[in-house]
């Protein structure tokens, strides 16, 4: 048994959204770089120590920016799987959810790096990204199921 896969005409929205995730990754990199310079954390150190963070708000904020970037890198692959597979059957909805996910991830980072929030609690502003990512995973699973069952 073979399966012919036809990419929907609106799949370009999915590809544009996938590209947007790389722009958001670039935003994270630039964000970390600016906090690294301000905190004077030398390469190759990935983080400032807990003791350094107690002494310096800049080092604490660098760690927040670095952790936000790491969290993004942890979530981007599965988001892309959901987007690219779910987009085969639901291209416009997948692209819209993916774009909202990107915006939510930027909000997460900006919130995480707020000077007036302790313990990175400002990141909660981006909590929607978890639900959006879940929606993409569900659509990906539905697409797979529909391909199996015809």
Image (cartoon, grey):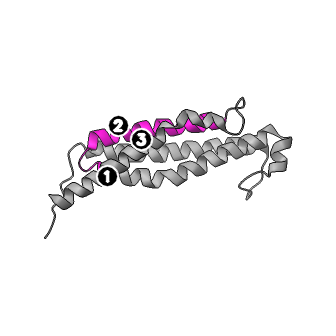
Q: Residue furthest bottom?
A: 1
Residue assigned mark 2: 96
Q: Residue at x 59, y 39 (%)?
A: 109
- Work out which quarter of the rendered image holds the N terminus and state it: bottom left
**Quick one: label 2, few (<14), some, or many (20+) residues within 10 Å?**
some
Residue 83 can be seen in this image: no
Q: Residue at x 42, y 45 (%)?
A: 133
- In the image, 144: left or right of 101? left
Cα–Cα span, label 2 and label 1 = 15 Å
* 93 over 22 or under it: above or below: above
- In the image, 93: left or right of 59? left
Residue assigned mark 3: 132
Residue assigned mark 1: 140
- Work out which quarter of the rendered image holds the C terminus and state it: bottom left
Magenta highlight on residue 100? yes
Q: Position of residue 49 (x, y in %)?
A: 80, 52
Assign a secondary structure to mark 3. helix
Residue stretch rendered in magenta on the structure? 84-113
- Which of 46/117 is in front? 117
């Amino acid at each position: 048994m073979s399966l012919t896969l036809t990419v929907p005409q609106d799949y370009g929205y999915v590809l544009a959204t996938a590209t947007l995730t790389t722009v958001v990754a670039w935003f994270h990199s630039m964000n970390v770089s600016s906090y690294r310079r301000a905190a004077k954390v030398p390469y190759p150190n990935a983080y400032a120590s807990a003791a350094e963070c107690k002494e310096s708000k800049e080092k604490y904020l660098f760690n927040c920016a670095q952790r936000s970037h790491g969290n993004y890198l942890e979530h981007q692959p599965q988001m892309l799987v959901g987007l690219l597979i779910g987009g085969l059957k639901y291209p416009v909805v997948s692209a819209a959810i993916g774009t909202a996910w990107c915006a939510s991830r930027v909000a997460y980072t900006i919130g995480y790096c707020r000077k007036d929030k302790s313990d990175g609690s400002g990141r909660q502003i981006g909590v929607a990204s978890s639900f959006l990512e879940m929606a993409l995973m569900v659509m990906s699973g539905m697409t797979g199921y529909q391909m199996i069952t015809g």
